[in-house]
Image (cartoon, coloured by chain):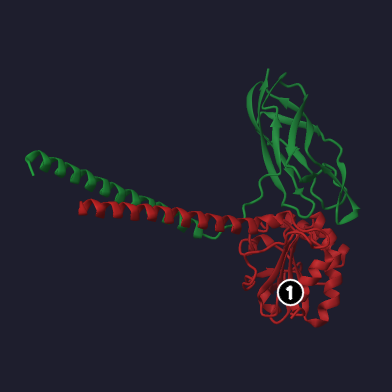
Chain colours: A red, B green
C-alpha cells in the first residue's frame, strides 16, 4: 500500500511538471508573439501627427552598426568619421515616392540643427551593377541627378544593400535611424511619418529632451 | 497470504512499475520537446520579409495559332493596401511596371498594352500625383508562339509601395503553358 501511495505521489508530481511545462511554453510563445508584433507592426506606420503606432527597431538602444561606404565621388565615408555628432542615417532611393516627400523635410531640419552638431547621412538603396561599369556609371548619374534636383546639402552615400543586414534588412523605404553623440541608436522610423516626428527624434539624438 | 494473493500483488506491482516508467519516459520526452521549443523561441525574432505585392492570376494555359501574333489578356492582382507604379509613372525615376518573356522560351513578345494608371496621392502630400495600379489589372500581351508546347516563365517587374513606404523593385514569374497549333 505504501509503495502504491509513493507511485501515486510520483504520478501527481509528473502531472504537475506537465502542467508547469505547458504553462512555461505558452508564456514563452506569448512573449515571442509580442516581440514579433513589435517588430512587424510599424509597417502600417504612423499618421501625419505621429499619433499612431511607432516603429520599435530591435537596434534601438544599441550602438549603430559600423560601416564604410562610398559617396558619389568615390570617397570612403565611415560612420566613425562622425563620432561626437548626432546623426540621422536615412536610407532612401530615387524610385521611392515617400522619400521624395521626406527629403525636403530632412534638408530643412538639417540646416536648422547643424550648428548644434547634427548631420544627416543619406544612404541610397538604388541598385548598383558593379559588374557593368557603363550601367554603374548611369546608376550613379541618376542618384546624382536626384541629389542635385533636391539640393541635398548633406553627405550622400551609395550601396545601402551592402550594409542592409546589420540594419535589419531594409525591406521598406524610407527608413531612418537616429544616432546620438555616443553612437547609440535612440530612435528609428520606418516609412514616411511626419516632419514633427522626425524633428522630435533629432532632438532626442541631440539630447535636447533631457 | 496464499499463492494466488502473492501472484496478484506481484502482478499489480509490475503494472504500477510499468506505469511509472511509462510516465517517466513521457515526461522526459515532453520536457525535451518543451525545452527545445523554448530554445527555438529564444532565437532573435526577425521581421518577415514582405511577401510579393503582385500575383499572377490567369490564364495558366493558352492555345493559339503557331506563328500568328495573338493578343492574350493576362490578369494580375495586387495585395490590398498596396499599389505599384503603372507602365507610365508620373515622375522620372519611378520604376515602371514591365511585362517580358525571356528569349528562347518558344514564345516571343511582340508588344504589350498596359492599362492606364489610376491617379493616386499619398495622404501626407496631396500635391504629388502618382500613376499607379491597384487591386487587379490586365496586361494585353501580343505574343507569337512557335509550333508545339512551351512552358513559358513570363516576368513582371514592378515596384510596390503602400501609403508610407516602398519596397525595392521585384520581378515575379507568371508561368503559362502555351500551345502553338
Q: Where A195 falls versus B40 (above or below)? A: below
Q: Residue furthest right?
A: B127
Label 1 chain ID: A
- For the residue pair A187 and B34, the one nearer the viewer reads as B34
Q: Where A116 falls versus B42 (above or below)? A: below
Q: Where A93 falls versus B159 (above or below)? A: below
> Does the image show residue A183?
yes
Task: Identify the residue at horizontal 87%, vertical 71% (top origin).
Answer: A108
- Left of A148 or right of it: where is B100? left
Q: Quadrant of the C terminus of chain B?
A: top right
> Does the image show residue A155?
no
Number of marks drawn: 1
- Residue A105 quadrant: bottom right
Q: What kind of element bears circle 1?
A: strand
- For the residue pair A34 and A160, the one nearer the viewer reads as A34
Task: Identify the residue at horizontal 47%, vertical 57% (top origin).
Answer: A24
Measured as percent of width and height from the top left, residue B165 is found at 76, 55
Measured as percent of width and height from the top left, residue A47 is found at 80, 58
- Left of A65 or right of it: where is B168? right
Task: Identify the residue at horizontal 78%, vertical 42% (top origin).
Answer: B97
Q: Quadrant of the N terminus of chain B?
A: top left
Q: Residue furthest front?
A: B1
Q: Residues within 10 Å of mark 1 (few under 14, many from 20)?
A: many
Measured as percent of width and height from the top left, residue A79 is found at 68, 74
Q: Which residue is mark 1?
A: A87
- Residue B66 quadrant: top right
Measured as percent of width and height from the top left, residue A28 is found at 51, 57
Amino acid at each position: 500500500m505504501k509503495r502504491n501511495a509513493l507511485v501515486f505521489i510520483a504520478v501527481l508530481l509528473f502531472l504537475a511538471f506537465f502542467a508547469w511545462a505547458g504553462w512555461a511554453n505558452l508564456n514563452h510563445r506569448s512573449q515571442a508573439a509580442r516581440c514579433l508584433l513589435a517588430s512587424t507592426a510599424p509597417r502600417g506606420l504612423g499618421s501625419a501627427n505621429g499619433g499612431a503606432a511607432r516603429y520599435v527597431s530591435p537596434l534601438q538602444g544599441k550602438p549603430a552598426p559600423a560601416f564604410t561606404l562610398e559617396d558619389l565621388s568615390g570617397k570612403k565615408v565611415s560612420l566613425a568619421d562622425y563620432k561626437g555628432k548626432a546623426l540621422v542615417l536615412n536610407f532612401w532611393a530615387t524610385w521611392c515616392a515617400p522619400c521624395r516627400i521626406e527629403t525636403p523635410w530632412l534638408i530643412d531640419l538639417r540646416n536648422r540643427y547643424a550648428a548644434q552638431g547634427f548631420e544627416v547621412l543619406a544612404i541610397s538603396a538604388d541598385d548598383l551593377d558593379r559588374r557593368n561599369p557603363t550601367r554603374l556609371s548611369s546608376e550613379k548619374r541618376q542618384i546624382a541627378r536626384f541629389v542635385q534636383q533636391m539640393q541635398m546639402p548633406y553627405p550622400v552615400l551609395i550601396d545601402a544593400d551592402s550594409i542592409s543586414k546589420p540594419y535589419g534588412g531594409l525591406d521598406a523605404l524610407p527608413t531612418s535611424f537616429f544616432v546620438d553623440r555616443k553612437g547609440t541608436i535612440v530612435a528609428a522610423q520606418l516609412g514616411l511619418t511626419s516632419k514633427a516626428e522626425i524633428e522630435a527624434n533629432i532632438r532626442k539624438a541631440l539630447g535636447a529632451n533631457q | 497470504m496464499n499463492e494466488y494473493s502473492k501472484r496478484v500483488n506481484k502482478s499489480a506491482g509490475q503494472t504500477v512499475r510499468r506505469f511509472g516508467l511509462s510516465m517517466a519516459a513521457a515526461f522526459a520526452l515532453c520536457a525535451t520537446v518543451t525545452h527545445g521549443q523554448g530554445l527555438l523561441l529564444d532565437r532573435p525574432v526577425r521581421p518577415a520579409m514582405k511577401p510579393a505585392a503582385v500575383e499572377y492570376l490567369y490564364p495558366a494555359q493558352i492555345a493559339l495559332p503557331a506563328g500568328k501574333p495573338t493578343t492574350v489578356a493576362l490578369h494580375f492582382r495586387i495585395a490590398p493596401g498596396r499599389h505599384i507604379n503603372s507602365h507610365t509613372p508620373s515622375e522620372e525615376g519611378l520604376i515602371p511596371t514591365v511585362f517580358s518573356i525571356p528569349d528562347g522560351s518558344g514564345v516571343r513578345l511582340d508588344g504589350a498594352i498596359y492599362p492606364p494608371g489610376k491617379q493616386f496621392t499619398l495622404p501626407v502630400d496631396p500635391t504629388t500625383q502618382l500613376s499607379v495600379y491597384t487591386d487587379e489589372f490586365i496586361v494585353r500581351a501580343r505574343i507569337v508562339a512557335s509550333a508545339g508546347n512551351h512552358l513559358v516563365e513570363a516576368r513582371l517587374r514592378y515596384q510596390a509601395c503602400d501609403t508610407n513606404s516602398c519596397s525595392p523593385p521585384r520581378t515575379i514569374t507568371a508561368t503559362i503553358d502555351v500551345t502553338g497549333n
